[in-house]
Image (tube, rainbow, N blue to C red):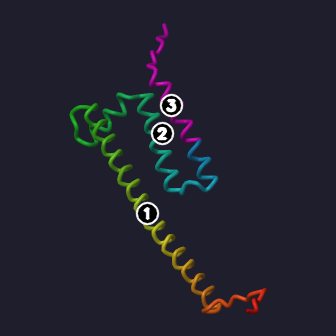
Amino acid sequence: MTQLIQLEIYQWLAPIIGLFFIYRTIVQYMRRKRTFVAMVVWILFWMSITLMAIIPNPVSMKIASILGFRSNVTAVIFVSIALLFLFVFYLSSTIEKLEHQMTDLVRKIAIDEKNKLNEQEDKEPAIPLKKNKKSKVG
């Protein structure tokens, strides 16, 4: 007699979400919105989430044995927190880089605007002459 495998909600929902984000990541890479390295990192991340959802016990036990934890739950929590810190570090580095680029761009625009104003002032006469169309005789 065959035995039906009872799947929990997360075991079919997580793979669907994972496949969607893998597809989305590949499309973003093809549209040049992601680098190759970022694409690989995100695909590996979503594949691991999908794998953890489909076969949670063997994967978590393997992670625990590799890292030397006695409990597979502790190992999964540790790896999850480590990944979160890694992503926060990456995001803060990216934000810092963007802030520097924006500061440099604003400075360049300000210098260009100042140079344009100086060029316009050099072309105009120092004292503007006003011509009166009507002259009053007194």
Q: At numbered mark 3, what does the secondary structure look like: helix, strand or loop?
A: helix
Residue at point 45%, 15% (across, down):
6
Image quarter (top left, top right, bottom left or bottom right) of the C terminus? bottom right
Q: What's the residue type where badge 3 is placed?
A: Pro
Coordinates of residue 19 in the picture (x, y in percent): 55, 36
Coordinates of residue 76 in the picture (x, y in percent): 31, 36
Q: Disc number at residue 127?
A: none
Whether tag 2 and tag 1 are in contact, CB under 8 A, the answer is no
First in residue order: circle 3 vs circle 1: 3
Residue holding disc 1: 99
Whether tag 3 and tag 1 are in contact, CB under 8 A, the answer is no
Q: Disc number at residue 15?
A: 3
Q: What's the residue type where badge 2 is placed?
A: Met
Coordinates of residue 11 in the picture (x, y in percent): 46, 25
Residue at point 54%, 56% (across, down):
36
Q: Disc number at residue 47?
A: 2
Magenta stretch, residue numbers: 1-23
First in residue order: circle 3 vs circle 2: 3
Task: Please indicate whether residue 48 sits to the left or right of residue 116 in the image.
Answer: left
Q: Residues within 10 Å of mark 2 (few under 14, many from 20)?
A: some
